[in-house]
Amino acid sequence: MYFAKEDRYEKMKYAYCGNSGLKLPLVSLGLWHNFGDHSNLESMKDILFTAFDNGITHFDLANNYGPAPGSAEKNFGIILKEDFGKYRDEMIISTKAGYTMWEGPYGDFGSRKYLIASIDQSLKRMGLEYVDIFYHHRMDKNTPLEETCGALAQIVNSGKALYVGLSNYDGETLEQAAKILGELKVPFIINQNRYSIFDRTIENNGLKDMAGKLKKGIISFSPLAQGLLSDRYLNGIPADSRIVTDGRFLNENNLTANKLEAIRRLNDIAKERNQSLAQMALSWVLKDEVMTSVLIGASKSSQVLDNISAIENTVFSEEELKKIDEIVKENE
């Protein structure tokens, strides 16, 4: 039987999602990897309990997380039922819909049919009455934004989600969606996007600036670039790395000679800051006020503890930021 540590809130820091009243921990736990049917339930519990014992209150899922799709939500639901559920009101649980979840024409993107069916399925898998944040997971040029936003409004109004978010949107589409959601009086508070030292897409597509202008939060996924921004690849590709064991999102082609050189030079800066490369990469994302939180993934509890330490130093000098940018540009 799991009982959370009494001092769990003493070290973690929390930030508001934009101008909403909801706070997230600066470090949140994503269940994208390591919570599917190929993973061990006891290992999942160890990761979740370690996170919660250290102030991580936000657990992020999606309908298609696995493998197989739906299995991360199912396994999280089992753990909630067996050990974790008594702390439900201390948690922020989020899920999403937008990517392919089931066969046929109604199993992905942004239609009203798909989104409302998906939230019902997700709640059933997790054994929940509601989620705290429900995201539309990706832009859909073939479905009117009014339809997608209307479905999000109904999901909130029916009590199945408290807040809504948008994921993988660009700045222009975010602005359009925010206007519609505002008119519908939907509590849209946060954007979830890939962002790291190596991936500056939200700086280039207007999302980061627009989120700041609209006072909406941003939570970053893949802040470690699928593990490249860590010490795992400083000396090449280890046998137990994600490149070897799961090539769906990171493969050997991602680790070019230029990329490896950049990783090593960034690691030198991290050492000067008395941080690991992973800690510095997380701190770099959190340096800006518009960033609410970073989503970490973990295959073991020690990674959770190491990553949490990033919140102790999120301030960078102008010289450090200039060096980091130069390293990335020189090794693209």
Image (tube, rainbow, N blue to C red):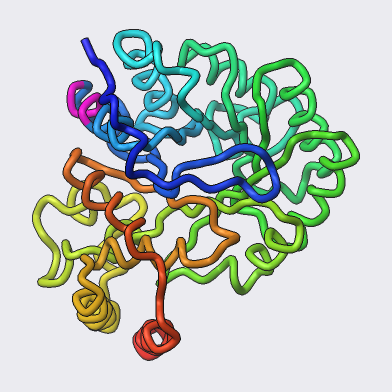
Front residue of this view, candidates 27 and 170: 27
Q: Residue at x 68, y 43 (%)?
A: 189
- Determine whether, in the image, residue 272 is placed left or right of residue 154: left
Residue 38 visible to the viewer: no
- Determine whether, in the image, residue 266 is placed left or right of residue 315: left
**Residue found farthest to the right:** 183
Residue 229 vs 62, above or below: the answer is: below
Front residue of this view, candidates 10 and 243: 10
- Determine whether, in the image, residue 183 is placed left or right of residue 214: right
Q: Position of residue 255 (x, y in %)?
A: 26, 71
Q: Residue at x 85, y 34 (%)?
A: 185
Residue 123 vs 107, above or below: the answer is: above
Taking the magenta stretch, the answer to whether it contains residue 324 is no
Taking the magenta stretch, the answer to whether it contains residue 45 is yes
Q: Position of residue 317 (x, y in %)?
A: 41, 82
Q: Quadrant of the N terminus?
A: top left
**Which residues, given as a range, are shown in magenta?**
42-46
Residue 244 vs 202, above or below: the answer is: above
